Image (cartoon, grey):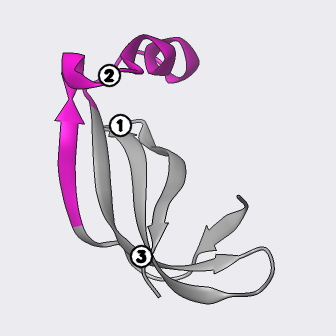
């Protein structure tokens, strides 16, 4: 699903870190070794069809590497 985050991510929290991340080996191969965390939060998004609303999004994040692989987990509006 193609989308764009159009506002700040609010209520962000860590849901897994380090070895608790199932995809850790893939993340290290793709983006390098780092202190990886899986995070979630609420954001305003714009879908490819033009719809704008709130959604719960998940992503991977590492200090010094940035934020990667945003996914929509559920639409809230």
Helix, strand or loop status at disc 1: loop
- Residue under circle 3? 43
Check disc 1: other Cα within 10 Å, few if <14, some if 14-19, many if 20+.
few
Bounds of the magenta segment: 12-36
Of the pair 29 and 50, the residue shown nearer to us: 50
Which circle marks residue 34 in the picture? 2
Q: Distance between the residues labelled 1 and 3?
A: 23 Å
Q: Earlier in the sequence, mark 1 or mark 2?
A: 2
Q: Is residue 44 above or below residue 40?
A: below
Decide if residue 33 is on the left or right side of residue 13: right
- According to the picture, the residue beneath numbered tag 1 turns out to be 64
Q: In which quarter of the image is the N terminus?
A: bottom right
Q: Disc 1 or 3, which lies upstream in sequence?
A: 3
Please give left or right for residue 72 compared with residue 18 in the image.
Answer: right
Q: Residue at x 20, y 44 (%)?
A: 15
From what the image shows, is residue 49 above or below residue 66? below
Mark 1 vs mark 2: give the one in front.
Answer: 2
Which quadrant of the figure has residue 8? bottom left
Labelled pair 1, 2 in contact (Cβ < 8 Å): yes
Q: Which residue is pictured at 37% across the width and 18% down the height?
A: 24
Of residues 10 and 62, the one drawn nearer to the viewer in this rendering:
10
Distance CA(mark 1)–CA(mark 2): 8 Å
- Nearest to viewer (mark 1 / mark 3): 3
Q: Tell whether position 21 is magenta.
A: yes
Q: Say if mark 3 contacts mark 2, CB within 8 Å.
A: no
Percent x, y of residue 20: 21, 22
> Could you tell me which residue is drawn at 42 percent across and 36 percent down?
65
- Between discs 3 and 2, the one toward the N terminus: 2
Is 3 situated left or right of 49 in this image?
Answer: left
């Amino acid at each position: 699903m193609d989308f764009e985050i159009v506002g700040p991510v609010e209520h962000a929290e860590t849901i897994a870190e380090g070895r608790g991340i199932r995809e850790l080996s893939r993340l290290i191969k793709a983006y390098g070794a780092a202190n990886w965390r899986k995070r979630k939060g609420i954001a305003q998004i714009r879908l490819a069809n033009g719809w704008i609303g709130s959604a719960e999004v998940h992503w991977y994040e590492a200090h010094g590497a940035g934020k990667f692989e945003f996914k929509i987990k559920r639409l809230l509006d």
